[in-house]
Image (cartoon, rainbow, N blue to C red):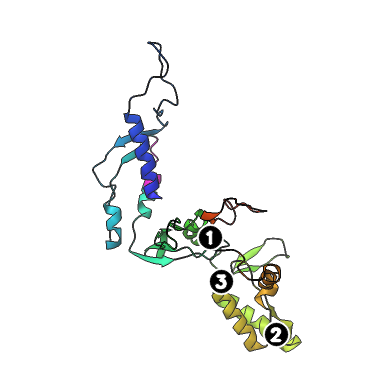
Amino acid sequence: MMRMICAIVRALSLRRSEPARAVGRGPEATQRRGSGHLAPVPGYTALANDTEPNGTCSGPANEWRNRMVTVSKISRRDGRAETEAEYRDRFKFDRVSWGSHCIDCYPGNCPYRVYVRDGSIVFEEQSGTLPVIEKGVPDMNPMGCQKGANWSRTLNGGERIHWPLKRVGKRGSGQWERVSWEQACNEVADGIIDAIQEQGPESMIALSGCNMSTWGVTGRTRFFSQIGGITTDLNAEMNDFSPGHYLTYGKFDPVSSIDDWFHADVFFIWFSNPAFTRIP
């Protein structure tokens, strides 16, 4: 993202430094839009600086970023420099790790570099490390979409629930109160014990919610199996997704991998908008 922003800013700076080309014939030729000269952006001033690094970052993992040459700087005339400071602060980190995202996309599991500071993720970016599978076919790099790049913001976002909430009003009223983890675990445990003693373990059934990872499903299934509760096959919760593939197409993967789309002459997309939903 930073490289893309720098490229855009550099293009603006270079175009502003070029003289506007005249359009028309004779001395009456005038300058107009489309002549290759961009009008200044209100509230911004481009300051050319092609030799100094655009700040430095600590840690060996930042060497490549420290070598990046600043193509230009932008200063705000309205005094709101905190926006620039916030973005610069994001690029200070202690270490780099690997990560991915369990979201509804295809092919999914995109390899991301995760940048950590003080034990928390500050930003992430596509790794661009996927190998070439077939000669002459473009590789899948950088392999990562806006949803994945925004996952770290969702992780620490203000709308995410970080503690247990207990309903205090009628169902659907939206009235909740914050409780401790100890209270939440004790009340859930008491409810499970009461259900087993009063109606038997078969009165409980385990179902998955959205964004349930493999580890979450495995732990839940193991727990309910130990106490005698009812567990369902995953396909029963997905409208027989896997068996439906075999019954309809004869195999689970009826098409080749996504990189083979390069050989296609026609794309037929039905009831889907990949640019906004299942981003390939």
Residue at position x 62%, y 70% in the image: 252
| Type of amino acid at the residue the image marks with label 1 | Ile
Kindly identify which residue carries mark 2.
Answer: 194
Residue 79 lies within the magenta run: yes
Residue segment shown in magenta: 78-84
The percent position of residue 9, horizontal first and vertical second, equals: 37, 39
Seen as rendered, the residue at the extreme right is 199
| Mark 3 → mark 2, Cα distance in angstroms | 28 Å
Kindly identify which residue carries mark 3.
Answer: 213
Residue 62 lies within the magenta run: no
Q: Is residue 81 left or right of residue 264?
A: left
Q: Which of marks 3 and 1 is in front?
A: 1
Q: Which of marks 3 and 2 is in front?
A: 3
| Mark 3 → mark 1, Cα distance in angstroms | 23 Å
Vertical side of 7 occupied by 228: above or below: below
Q: Is residue 77 left or right of residue 268?
A: left
| Type of amino acid at the residue the image marks with label 3 | Ser
Residue at position x 64%, y 69% in the image: 209
Vertical side of 224 occupied by 119: above or below: above
- Dot 2: what SS? helix
